[in-house]
Image: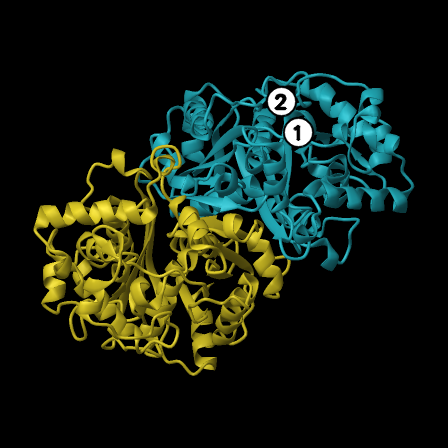
Chain colours: A yellow, B cyan
Amino acid sequence: MDKIYIVGVGMTKIGRFYERSGRELFVEALSKAIDDAGGLKPKALVVGNMTSSVLMEQDSLGALLADYGGLRGVPAFKVEAACGSGGAAFYAGYSLVKSGLADVVAVGGLEKLTENLTSAVTKALAQAADAEYELFYGVSFTGLNAMIARLYMNKFNYTREDLAYWALRMHEYASYNPYAQLPRKTTLEAILKSPVVADPLHLFDCSPIGDGAAVAILVRGEERAREIAKAMGRDVLVEVKGVALATDSVDLGSRNNLLALESTIKASREAYKMAGIRAKDIDYVEVHDAFHITGYLALEDMGFAPKGEAPKLWKEGRFGKGDKPEVNFSGGLKARGHPVGATGVYQIVEATMQLRGDFPGYKASDPEIAATQNIGGVGTYTTVTVLKRT
Amino acid sequence: MDKIYIVGVGMTKIGRFYERSGRELFVEALSKAIDDAGGLKPKALVVGNMTSSVLMEQDSLGALLADYGGLRGVPAFKVEAACGSGGAAFYAGYSLVKSGLADVVAVGGLEKLTENLTSAVTKALAQAADAEYELFYGVSFTGLNAMIARLYMNKFNYTREDLAYWALRMHEYASYNPYAQLPRKTTLEAILKSPVVADPLHLFDCSPIGDGAAVAILVRGEERAREIAKAMGRDVLVEVKGVALATDSVDLGSRNNLLALESTIKASREAYKMAGIRAKDIDYVEVHDAFHITGYLALEDMGFAPKGEAPKLWKEGRFGKGDKPEVNFSGGLKARGHPVGATGVYQIVEATMQLRGDFPGYKASDPEIAATQNIGGVGTYTTVTVLKRT
């Protein structure tokens, strides 16, 4: 059975790029990834994106970005799975390589949000929720996450301050990341005093709106991956050992459990099984902290902390440098930024670079196994990947 | 190498369903497909859809439809490739089965258009074009196809009447199809006298706006497919012999050739090669006639007619009952209807039923090999499938 490798990665800085179109951002990331793969030309393109239809008035994004990226003619399509679009695109792209339909596949993520009014972006992002059973009643996406956070705080006896340490550390890490949207440290006081967005979530508990694009290039076969790595002067390969996508209801009202993301539990179990590992084998992980609460839930639901204890362990300093796993040294969605449909691909690019040892920001402690967790909606989708340095 | 089979199909009638939501339509099609597969439960769902983000204010469609269809938890995502979303979803779904990521995959298509204002639908469909280089200037999607039609008429010396025979025959076929949106015959006079939409395209040269959903269930392995067929009292299997997706530029201004769809030429060649067949081996085909011009281009670009001659051959009666290939006995997009992102799946469902001999409308002459061609944009995407009765 041919193994699948990530042989090239590229990403743009995340920010507010009023002067650059979505296709320009994507071509920057794709070109970097192709260069990073020694000039290897992808034979197919899968693009993760959530809001191009609504905010860019653009469908046909897959073909459009293939064409602008110099790949006219290749199989291409867009995958939408809300904020989990990037992870789902990776799942689809992995499948194309594995199935033999294409032997070199670029998986990209793009989101262009900031040139729209905040009200338009808020509405577009709310479409991750159920239009008929949630959105219709006026709840925003942040509001739904706020309800989960409140429930979690009540159930496990946490205060706002207990949870605020997430953002503190993300800003610290992001300050080292040249691709981060908010590369600056903050203080506990600033987090606590930041304005309310949807109680109990304050501004600094939430990820920012940003534009960005990221691309990872997958190939089949160890020999080919080794040739590319050698040509690029890299002495390690990054193999995709596991990838799984799981779903849950869109609306929260019909969930079995609001204190855990069942899609994350399912996807992580399946990805670990496929990779032949257990949670304790993972050295490094990038989790989807669109809000502090989703970061904590990820740590619990992926098997790194007992239910209800992630914030306590986090506050005590766990999951930092030298611990296992080390978490979100990119700065996370919270401070690296969250270009929605691109986020899942950013995580994979970052984890790949951490495994190769060339991530340009805060460096993990020589990890051998890394994982990423990308969610869409309030855990409506979760894609978990397991990557291994070989 | 395990072979891939279509073991269950289902679809809704296409129409204006003001009283039924998109999820209801989809569940009807999915339930029918599951029943048709002897109750087999899909382990993954890929949904082709173009406009849910804009017209239904709903993202997360993959998980939403999985959940409402009784498949909560399975891997699911939406594929968008404009009007070619259904075909691209099939390509992705085939890949999931072939790769081994899932052994039973439902590929669905859904579109819910008609409860919106026509102006909103026209704008949503125009997003298949390039937002920055075409749409910005106010051209509609029909307008772009009209320009191609005009160029084709000028180049190959055809009149409006020469091209009008497409619609005439589609309405004839649709009159037998219980799933068709416009199941009624028409006359050449009615077609020619119908109001102008975008010159030279008149109303009856264009496909209607409609709601509908269709689902096909794929499995890996001949033994399993045979067990299902046997349990359902069917003595034939339908194997997916070839599937290919190709793209072209979104904007027409940068095309190499406006008189042919290069994505269709490329996808059909690749799908035939994968299936080990040639165009002349195909007995039955469903092509994407969103406008008469795209129907004629499909026949030429798939290798069934020399360039510039499809309308002439069509007018002479070719491609009808007893010819090879027989074309669009469903009534085509023109009269069966065009629920955009579902259309590619409708074609596959119809071709499967023609191969099995249980299509409830106008019946093909005992075909052994069938093909479908689904385009997105003005040939920005083409997916071609080759199905074989075994």
Q: Which mark is residue A278?
A: none
Q: Position of residue A26 (x, y in %)?
A: 52, 65
Quadrant holding the C terminus of chain A: bottom left
Q: Is residue A297 left or right of residue B68?
A: left
- In 3D space, how far apart are the residues under numbered discs 1 and 2 (Cα atoms)? 8 Å
Q: Which residue is mark 1?
A: B208
Compared with A11, A111 (above or below) is: above
Residue at the image position 57 percent from the left and 31 percent from the top:
B346
Expressed as whole percent of the image width and height from the top left, the position of residue B26 reads 45, 29
Mark 1: amino acid: Pro
Which residue is depicted at the point 40% across and 34% down? Answer: B65
Q: Nearer the viewer, residue B183 or A102?
A: B183
Q: Nearer the viewer, residue B5 or B329?
A: B329
**Quadrant occupied by the N terminus of chain A:** bottom left
What chain is tagged by disc 1?
B
Closer-to-camera residue (B332/A333): A333
Element at label 1: loop
Which of discs 1 and 2 lies nearer the camera? The answer is 1
Q: Is residue B106 above or below residue A101?
A: above
- The amino acid sitting under disc 2 is Gln
1 or 2: tag closer to the N-terminus: 2
Residue B322 seen in the current view: no
> Which quadrant holds residue B192?
top right
Judged from this view, the residue extending furthest toward the right is B157
x, y percent for residue A33: 48, 71
**Res A96 visible:** yes
Mark number, residue B181:
2
Which chain letter matches label 2? B
User: For mark 2, does the 10 Å Cα neighbourhood hold few (<14), some (14 to 19), or many (20 or more) residues?
Assistant: many
Disc 1 to disc 2: CB gap under 8 Å: yes
As rendered, which of A151 and A35 lies closer to the eye? A151
Asked which secondary structure carries label 2, the reply is loop
